Amino acid sequence: MKKSALRLALPALLIGVSIIVLVPGGAKGHEGAKGIVFERMEHMKALAASMKALAPFAFGEAVFDGGEVARLAETISARTGQEMVRLFPKDSFDTTSEANPAIWQRWDQFERLAEDAQKQAKALAQAALVKTTVGANFMRLAGACKSCHIEFRQEKAKTQQGAGRP
């Protein structure tokens, strides 16, 4: 992707991912969460922080540090794939969470998306020392995150509504 096209596409993608990942990620969103639900909410919050830290490198807004890009991408890789899947055991739906019950109904798809996020994070980590590849690899990783959130994350109000609450 050409640099100018990348500069145009990255802000839109990052804004979309930021809305999906970052908006309810604070402590308020964790009220009442316990056990594995709390653990996975903290896990997602840490993933969002790593993505946020990567963004300036992808946008060319930070002094390039391939080692830091690799470290952040490896952190994301370690938290996706089967490590992420582990945090969604059967019957762990909870209205304090934004996990959509569809996760457990379409488990194979959820696993594939978690594995794709890990694959994209690994690709970014491997390409991290080549400055010109970071933006495109970051976009693919952000797209993998967004794909999973579109399918399997719901706003808390919808989660509570789906549980029979007003």
Image (spheres, rainbow, N blue to C red):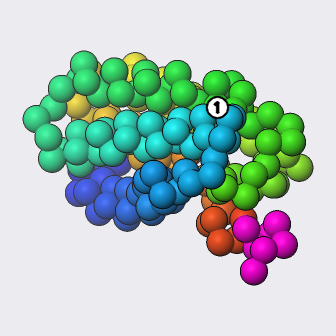
Give the residues drawn in magenta, as a range: 160-166
Residue 146 vs 60, above or below: the answer is below
**The C terminus: image quadrant:** bottom right
Q: Residue furthest front?
A: 32
Q: Is 164 a magenta residue? A: yes
Q: Is 10 a magenta residue? A: no
Displayed quadrant of residue 14: bottom left
Q: Residue furthest left?
A: 63
Q: Nearer the viewer, residue 153 or 92?
A: 92
Q: Residue at x 53, y 35 (%)?
A: 43
Determine whether, in the image, residue 85 is placed left or right of residue 139: right
Q: Position of residue 28 (x, y in %)?
A: 48, 58
Q: Judging from the image, what secondary structure is the residue with disc 1 in?
A: helix
Neighbour class for label 1 at 10 Å: few (<14), some, many (≥20)?
many
Q: Position of residue 13 (x, y in %)?
A: 41, 59
Determine whether, in the image, residue 104 is placed left or right of residue 23: right
Residue 16 makes an appearance in the image: no
Q: Nearer the viewer, residue 144 or 18?
A: 18
Question: What amino acid type is highlighted by mark number 1?
Answer: Met
Q: Residue at x 22, y 45 (%)?
A: 56
Q: Position of residue 20 (x, y in %)?
A: 51, 59
Displayed quadrant of residue 124: top left
Q: Nearer the viewer, residue 125 or 83?
A: 83
Q: Nearer the viewer, residue 98 or 66?
A: 98
Residue 154 makes an appearance in the image: yes
Instruction: Give the total of numbered labels.
Output: 1
Q: Position of residue 115 (x, y in %)?
A: 66, 31
The residue that mark 1 highlights is 84
